[in-house]
Image (cartoon, rainbow, N blue to C red):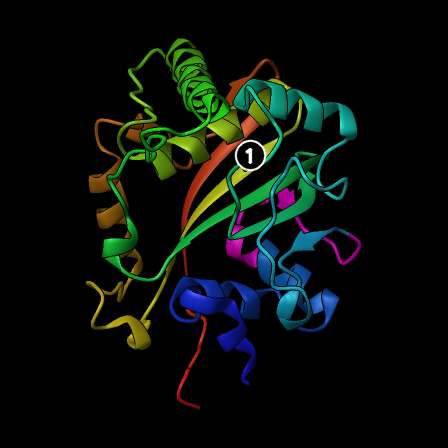
Amino acid sequence: MKWWEGLGKDNQGSRPRCVLLTDGNRNEVAKCLTQLVDSPSVAVSPDNEWRPCGKTSVKEPQLDKSDNFVSPAIRFKLQNWWIAAPRGSRTPTWDIASTCEIMGEQGLLLLEAKAHENELSVSGKTPPKLGAKPNSHKNHEKIAQAISKAYDGLTKLTGNPWNLSRDTHYQLSNRIAWSWKLASLGIPVVLVYLGFLNTKDMAKNGKLFKSKADWERALINHSNGIVDNSCWGKCLDCNCTPFIPLIRVFNQPFDPCA
């Protein structure tokens, strides 16, 4: 079996490319991630921790499940903010997460990657099914409250409206909400929305990104009315802790027919 076949239904598009982006010599991966961010205030070193970690460790990271990214105390705060009943529940997984240096402080680099335009989902979080356990309903409501706190905080911070929601554009909303929450807990964050260029294996699935302009246009259109789009590329000051949302592209070759 080829390595990407072990990724299940996500064996094409952005998922295998994220694995390849983090595969190989640690010096080279650290340099690649640093160059991808392309900011003088952000650096990934070979000693930092990232997940996935190439073909040998393809699992997508959850920030509250590993000491590699945040301390046990922060993990507890994240779970308490997002989840009402932890047993059997899941927090968001990230395409790539890495510790890094941000403005001279230890922080987190978080990547959300897309391989074609249709991956930008406007769907809300799926509500619990009829007859679901009470804890499922409690968690569903707690997530709505957590996202609401995030958009209230960001609206006060920027002076412009944010409309993050559990019920529409849920993936975008939870990415922004988690980044804001981490910064509000004193952890510097760089959130990169990454468009993979020329993903020919996904040509039948949606419009591909052939340039940075293609990706920026698609993401801005997708986030319009949900995010304060003037904030992309800026450093937001969350109680003296930076949260930096960025739009980036990367050309990662991958041929599932090879």
Q: Is residue 241 visible?
A: no
Magenta residues: mostly which secondary structure?
loop
Q: Which of the 4 image quadrants contains residue 105? A: top right
Q: Which of the 4 image quadrants contains residue 186? A: top right
Residue appearing at x 72%, y 42% in the figure: 66
- Residue 54 is left or right of residue 215, and the answer is right
Q: Which of the 4 image quadrants contains residue 255? A: bottom left
**Farthest residue in the right direction?**
47
Quadrant of image for the C terminus: bottom left
Q: Is residue 233 visible?
A: yes
Graded by Cα atoms within 10 Å as few (under 14), some (14 to 19) or many (20 or more), the crowding at tag 1 reads few
Residue 121 vertical position relative to residue 168 in the rendered view, above or below:
below
Quadrant of image for the N terminus: bottom right
Which residue is denoted by mark 1 in the rendering? 89
Q: Position of residue 112 (x, y in %)?
A: 45, 48
Q: Position of residue 137 (x, y in %)?
A: 42, 22
* Amino acid, disc 1: Ser
Residue situated in front as seen by the camera: 92 or 197: 92
Is residue 37 found inside the magenta-colored segment of the image? yes
Residue situated in front as seen by the camera: 143 or 197: 143
Range of magenta residues: 35-47
- Residue 213 is left or right of residue 72, and the answer is left
- Residue 68 is left or right of residue 33, and the answer is right
Residue appearing at x 77%, y 29% in the figure: 72
